[in-house]
Amino acid sequence: MQRILSYMRKAIEEYKMIEEGDKIAVCLSGGKDSITMLNALKALQRFYPKKFELIAISIDPRIRIF
């Protein structure tokens, strides 16, 4: 997880992806990638200097919209 946090923080800072007071929504499909993203952002939230809100949204990827 430390390596993921390191890469994530570097990208967030380089591309200015998070600003103070942002609300970030993560869609959870139940897959490894979305669960890892949520866990990493939650860990980052504890020590990142810019405070942000984190929201998890559960989706069912098998639902056909069209």
Image: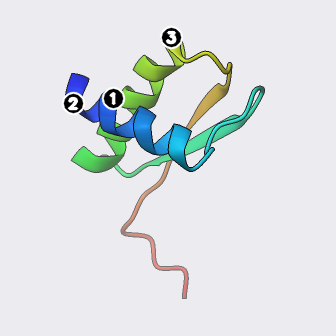
Which residue appears at 36% of the width and 27% of the height?
A: 39
Which residue appears at 43% of the width and 33% of the height?
A: 9
> Residue 25, how many percent across, how many down?
60, 42
For the residues bearing labels 3 and 2, Cβ distance under 8 angstroms: no
- Gap between marks 3 and 2 measured at Cα: 16 Å
Question: How many numbered discs sit on the rendered protein?
Answer: 3
Name the element at disc 3: helix
Residue on which the image places disc 2: 3
Between 3 and 63, the residue placed more toward the observer is: 3
3 or 1: tag closer to the N-terminus: 1
Q: Is residue 14 visible?
A: yes
Near mark 2 (Cα within 10 A), the count class, few <14, some 14-19 or many ≥20, is few
> Residue 43, how many percent across, how many down?
41, 18
The disc placed on residue 5 is 1
- Gap between marks 1 and 2 measured at Cα: 5 Å
**Residue type marked 2:** Arg
Residue on which the image places disc 3: 46
30 displayed left or right of 24: left
State the residue lying farthest toward the top: 46
Q: Is residue 31 visible?
A: no
For the residues bearing labels 1 and 2, Cβ distance under 8 angstroms: yes
State the residue lying farthest toward the bottom: 66
Which residue appears at 61% of the width and 15% of the height?
A: 49
For the residues bearing labels 3 and 1, Cβ distance under 8 angstroms: no
